Image: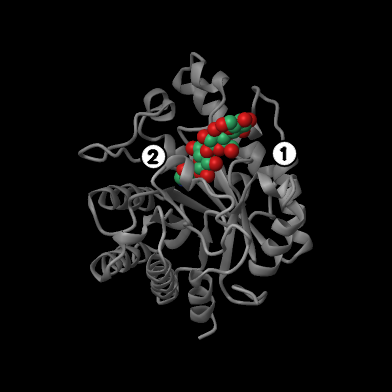
Amino acid sequence: DVVSRKGLPLNIGAAVGTAFYGGPDSQTYREVLKRQFNMVVCENEMKFENIQPLPGYFDFEKGDALLAFAAANGMKMRGHTLIWHQQNPLWLMQGSWTRETLLAVMREHIQTVMRHYRGRIAEWDVANECIDDGPGHGLRKTVWAEVIGPDYLDWAFRYAREADPDALLFYNDYGAEPENAKSDAVYRLVKGMKQRGVPIDGVGLQCHFHNDELGPAQLAAIAGNIKRFTELGLKVAVTELDIRIRKPAAARDYAVQAENYRQMIRLFRSNPDCSTFMMWGFSDRYSWIPQFFTDCDDALILDRNFEPKPAYAALRGELER
Ligand code: G3I
């Protein structure tokens, strides 16, 4: 009864949220997590505002707790995320920085966190969502880009490699899954980094999908996109998959969702440079979806009672082939 038996040559996992740390379901949540998966990632607890809430004050408690659980159960861990424009502390957002002082902050953050976890976190999302959604898809106008300049990402990855040479370093983004204008921009970004010798190992495709958007043409466009990234010598990870359904969900929607999960894992497994497949949670009881897309829900593979949905069976069936 496992999606990913230990020993499967793939990392299959889920984002772990507050239920892990306490509350009425904590025990069940942990049991299901260790039975079903071989990789975990913190949904929020290792983001900048949580891990360095005050300048120079680092709080590793929650990250350490998940890592200890992972290690005790033979699971790997991803790190999410070092550099982002959201979930940053006010001291960072409101500080008056120069290029030099902000580079120093970035370096200290990346290196203190990565050295703390050195050798124990397999993959890091070094940078998250740095491409703008507007026409042109330039670099997002974040504090990092505005104060440091467009080379801030190069420095982030160099600092990261220096801090933990064994961790795989990823650029992670959403909306860049199929070949489209945004993934073209991500492609240009990471290709430039490769050409400049910047130490990047992979691209993370978040994969927050709507159940109706994954037809054959879209899946082919995702496969094509994965192929071009891997042809640059990069790994591609599915980092935050969920497939939301418009409310109220009908039986047919769950069948479509199951087929979508099946197609995603199939497409992923068809490329040898893809080895990490993460979902953004595992039970519909705990998901970011209904808060952010109020007309949707039911995006994960287990229902609110941690019971398997058709999507679970589809995923498992595909993994057992
Ligand atoms: O911690 C506070 C808590 O103290 C407070 O009582 C409560 C009241 O609303 O809010 C809590 O913080 C919330 C936090 O999740 C923890 O639950 C924030 O309001 C809420 O905004 C935050 O949302 C997270 C979101 O990132 C923030 O952008 C989601 O849980 C998390 O799933 C989501 O994850 C992101 C990835 O990191 C990057 N890719 C997209 C993905 C989905 O948005």
The image quadrant of residue 143 is top left
Q: Is residue 244 left or right of residue 35?
A: left
Say which residue appears at 31% left-offset and 38% top-offset: 132
Q: Is residue 74 left or right of residue 82?
A: right
- Measured from the top left, where is residue 193 in percent x and y? 37, 48
| Rendered image quadrant of residue 75 | bottom right
List the residue tagged with mark 2.
130
Q: Compared to 272, does 39 lie above or below?
A: above
Q: Quadrant of residue 85?
A: top left
Closer to the N terminus: mark 2 or mark 1?
A: 1
Q: Secondary structure at mark 2?
A: loop
Residue situated in front as seen by the camera: 230 or 29? 29
Q: 3 or 62, which lies in front?
A: 3
In front here: 118 or 60? 60
CA separation in Å, label 2 and label 1: 25 Å
Could you say where residue 274 lies in the image, as x and y percent from the top left?
46, 68
Within 10 Å of disc 1 (Cα), the crowding (few <14, some 14-19, many 20+) is: some
**Residue 199 visible within the image:** no
Q: Looking at the picture, which amino acid does disc 1 mark?
A: Phe
Query: Is residue 321 visible to the viewer in this orientation of the structure?
Result: yes
In the image, residue 68 above or below residue 99: below
Left or right: residue 33 versus residue 274 is right
Q: Which residue is mark 1?
A: 60
Kind of element beneath mark 1: loop
Task: Give the residue drawn at x 50%, y 24%.
Answer: 102
